Image (cartoon, rainbow, N blue to C red):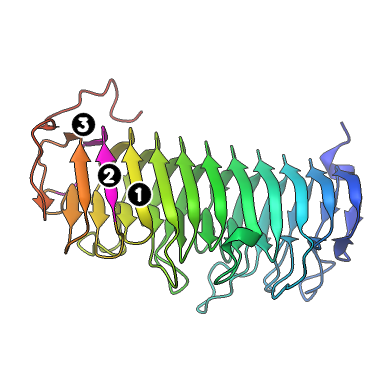
């Protein structure tokens, strides 16, 4: 493999329209601190393109590092069959900005399908690690997105966020260190508006304000979200008593949310379900070693239809609001082998 110190350095924007192309071992970024015209861009109609083994970085200017699709696009073509893998994407915009820059590491908008984003390191962007945004009423125009085995940390907004898209999978990612700010709740992962068929599978989330957040809807709430097998730990929310913006999970949007077989450890707020979702089913989860005895393991507000079922295990200082400990669950020490696992 080429040395990372001798990669060809492209300071102009790399804008691709075509098919069957591999970009390999490249360095893409600004020519200086004032440059605002750089990055890697794929326009609708482009298909079968790979970006791999490369470094894409920025400066304090507001620019997306990798952008798939076009904002405001109304045509019939799509960005299709794209692989973005084993890249280091970092330092886009100012993570300490006082305003909301929305400078994302990776942005997917316009029309896109069959996109794989895997095994990347994604960090220090003044927005989300990845934002998938089809815009209101267009959720079927961004579909079949697979975001997996990425390492995401210290972005201003989140590790990964979805708006108005369908058939999106976040799987086996590791995300940490996101805090509440005027650009979002500081979630490791989440979605809002009318996303549909969204899966969070076997991800790890830590040192975020919220582990996984599902926020409110705009028009017709998307059907089905599945939160299975995730490991959420060391969540220290800035305002743990605020059920809308803190906790291992906040579920207040979407229709038919299924939460099963997740492990939640060392958090100061558990699973919060404010009004907004039309249905939440909660099965076989563990909330262990809760660090606050005054905040709830489960919080349900209003008339959200919620089914708590299965062998859920709660911390020994368990608290509930809007529900009671169901018969098949226990409040006890789950006896983890190591509290630091």
Q: In which quarter of the image is the N terminus?
A: top right
Q: Is residue 275 above or below residue 49?
A: below
Residue 178 in view in this figure? no
Left or right side of 43 for 195: left
- Specify whether residue 280 is painted magenta: yes
- Depth check, front residue: 79 or 151: 79
Please state the horizontal and vertical placement of residue 282, each as a whole percent of the image: 26, 41
Q: Considering the numbered disc 2 on the image, is that residue within a helix, a strand or a loop? A: strand
| Mark 1 touches mark 2? (CB < 8 Å) | yes
Among numbered discs 2 and 3, the one appearing first in the sequence = 2
User: Magenta residues?
Assistant: 279-292
Residue that mark 2 sits on = 281
| Structural distance between the alpha carbons of marks 1 and 2 | 6 Å
Residue at horizontal 66 percent and vertical 55 percent from the top: 90
Label 2 packing within 10 angstroms: few (<14), some (14-19), many (20+): some
Q: Quadrant of the C terminus?
A: top left
| Structural distance between the alpha carbons of marks 3 and 1 | 16 Å
Label 3 packing within 10 angstroms: few (<14), some (14-19), many (20+): some
Please state the horizontal and vertical placement of residue 211, each as a whole percent of the image: 38, 50
| Mark 2 touches mark 3? (CB < 8 Å) | no
Which numbered disc covers residue 257?
Answer: 1
Which numbered disc covers residue 191?
Answer: none
| Structural distance between the alpha carbons of marks 2 and 3 | 10 Å
Residue 281 in view in this figure? yes
Please state the horizontal and vertical placement of residue 126, each as a whole percent of the image: 58, 66
- Depth check, front residue: 179 or 142: 142
Residue that mark 3 sits on = 310
- Specify whether residue 164 is painted magenta: no
């Amino acid at each position: 493999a080429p040395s990372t110190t001798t990669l060809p350095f492209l300071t102009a924007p790399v804008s691709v329209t075509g098919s069957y192309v591999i970009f390999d071992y490249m360095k893409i970024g600004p020519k200086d601190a004032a440059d605002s015209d750089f990055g890697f861009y794929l326009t609708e109609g482009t298909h079968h393109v790979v970006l791999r083994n490369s470094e894409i970085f920025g400066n304090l200017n507001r620019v997306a590092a990798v952008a798939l699709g076009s904002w405001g696009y109304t045509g019939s073509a799509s960005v299709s069959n794209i692989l973005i893998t084993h890249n280091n994407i970092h330092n886009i915009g100012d993570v300490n900005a006082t305003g909301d820059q929305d400078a994302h590491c990776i942005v997917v908008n316009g029309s896109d399908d069959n996109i794989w984003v895997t095994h990347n390191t994604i960090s220090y962007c003044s927005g989300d690690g990845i934002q998938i945004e089809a815009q209101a009423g267009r959720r079927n125009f961004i579909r079949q997105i697979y975001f997996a085995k990425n390492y995401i940390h210290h972005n201003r907004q989140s590790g990964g966020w979805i708006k108005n898209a369908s058939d999106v999978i976040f799987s086996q990612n590791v995300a940490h260190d996101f805090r509440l700010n005027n650009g979002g709740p500081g979630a490791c992962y989440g979605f809002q508006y009318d996303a549909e068929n969204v899966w969070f599978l076997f991800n790890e989330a830590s040192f975020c304000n919220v582990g996984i957040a599902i926020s409110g809807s705009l028009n017709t709430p998307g059907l089905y979200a599945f939160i299975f097998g995730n490991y959420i730990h060391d969540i220290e929310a800035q305002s743990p008593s605020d059920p809308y913006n803190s906790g291992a999970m906040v579920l207040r949007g979407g229709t038919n949310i299924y939460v099963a077989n997740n492990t939640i450890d060392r958090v100061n707020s558990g699973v919060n379900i404010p009004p907004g979702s039309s249905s939440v089913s909660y099965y076989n989860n563990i909330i262990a070693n809760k660090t606050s005895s005054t905040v709830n393991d489960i919080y349900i507000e209003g008339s959200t239809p919620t089914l708590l079922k299965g062998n859920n295990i709660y911390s020994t200082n368990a608290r509930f609001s809007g529900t009671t400990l169901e018969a098949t669950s226990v409040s006890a020490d789950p006896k983890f082998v190591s509290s630091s696992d």
